[in-house]
Amino acid sequence: MTSHSQSPETPIVPGGLRSLPRNVWVVTITSFLTDISTDMIANLIPLFLANVLGAKTGIIGLIEGIAESTASLLKVLSGQLSDRIGKRKGLTIAGYSISTLAKPFLYFAGSWWWVLIVRFADRVGKGVRTAPRDALVANSIDEKRRGLAFGLHRAGDTAGAMIGLLIALGVVWATQSGSLTLERATFQRLVLISIVPAVLAVLVLALGAREIQSPEAKVAEPPSLSLHGFDRRFRCFVPVLFLFTLGNSADAFLILRAQERGLSVVGMLGMLATFNLVYALISGPAGALSDKIGRRKLIIGGWLAYGVLYLGFALAMTAWQIWLLYALYGIYYGMVEGVAKAYVADIVPHQQRGTAYGIYHAVIGIAALPASLIAGLLWQGLGSWQGFGPQAPFLFGAMLALVAVILFVVWVPCVEEKTAARTQ
């Protein structure tokens, strides 16, 4: 770990994890601690809404969709602002701080709109931090190991999620073992515990990260919020990503599906911990593999895996089948999440990366609202319309995943990244 700021143009001697720059490790630890905090409670929110507050799936879909989509514009604006000023650290710290301040208010939630407000504030924090954080990572590492850096970040993030889930599992086991529904007191205990790692995450980032001044920073003509001026691969990738995400409803529906198939609260937390274990184990190797064979192959393979798994969720008959499918669901996340971010960095220059990551995350967030609303309506309907049942959202997601793969292959220009080209 070096003790000086490293220019993105500085050659890095090939090596393993130890030779990764300071910022990669600091951001990874920050995400690790944040996800310990977040996943103690985030995965239980749909159960809290359904079991304690009596909200229907349509309301749950609305909350999850608004929470992601209304913060999406901030991801673009924050990313563009970081490009304009040529700095990433301050905005990243601000975003993590907003989310940390929002969490304690869940303790007092007595209605679904209160949960909506807290989820919105938490996602505002995510919107502020995400694009500058990803640009900070991308600008701290050379392209030959960019996949490894983002893979490590996702692995740390996911390992934190797994620990958070295990803590939640322990609390639920101690207070309501075997129960099929979540109790208010249990949820409130977890909210209080989650504050500690959230505060530690902000401190680690503030004290440990170092600003990376890009050589193209403070350009005379700052990046536009439109797609004009970006590489054609990025311009084509964005609408395909939107289409895929339109079928990728909030994972809250997977949790509700598990409950509908008879899995207890403890069982669901164990299922989620298994998912995060698989996710964490896959992320690093998948990122490193993308450095060798190119990002496109991993993204296409991950989207295909997603389609097959969603088909499985639609057809699953028992709780153990849902558990197994959700564990395998970690393969999709491990193959795609970090690799897709590395792919964006490969096809977008330094001075546009904050804006590009803002657009990338905004597209995912904007699509999340209609995706979750569609899922809720397909499942439970609205008013006198009863919907098509629990299988429908997952069949819809599997279909759109297949269409997105076809469009990626035939429409997004197949120009291999420089990283992959040099290794072949």
Image (spheres, helix red, strand yellow):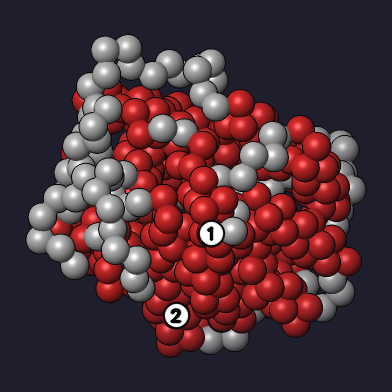
Tell me the CA gap for discs 1 and 2: 40 Å
Q: Nearer the viewer, residue 380 or 40?
A: 40
Looking at the image, residue 355 lies above or below residue 22? above
Name the amino acid type tagged 1: Thr
**Crowdedness near tag 2: few (<14), some (14–19) or many (≥20) residues, C-alpha within 10 Å:** many
Residue beneath the point at 68% across and 73% down? 328
Q: Nearer the viewer, residue 351 or 183?
A: 351
Residue beneath the point at 32% across and 12% down? 221
**Crowdedness near tag 1: few (<14), some (14–19) or many (≥20) residues, C-alpha within 10 Å:** few
Name the amino acid type tagged 2: Leu
Would residue 106 be found to the left or right of residue 207 on screen?
right
Q: Nearer the viewer, residue 244 or 143?
A: 143
| Mark whose residue sits in front, 1 or 2 | 1
The label on residue 166 is 2
Would residue 327 be found to the left or right of residue 204 on screen?
right
Question: Do tag 1 and tag 2 residues touch (Cβ < 8 Å)?
Answer: no
Q: Where does label 1 land, which residue?
A: 423
Q: Earlier in the sequence, mark 1 or mark 2?
A: 2
Is residue 205 something one can see in this rendering?
A: yes
Q: Quadrant of the N terminus?
A: bottom left
Residue beneath the point at 75% across and 82% down? 320
Looking at the image, residue 2 lies above or below residue 413? below
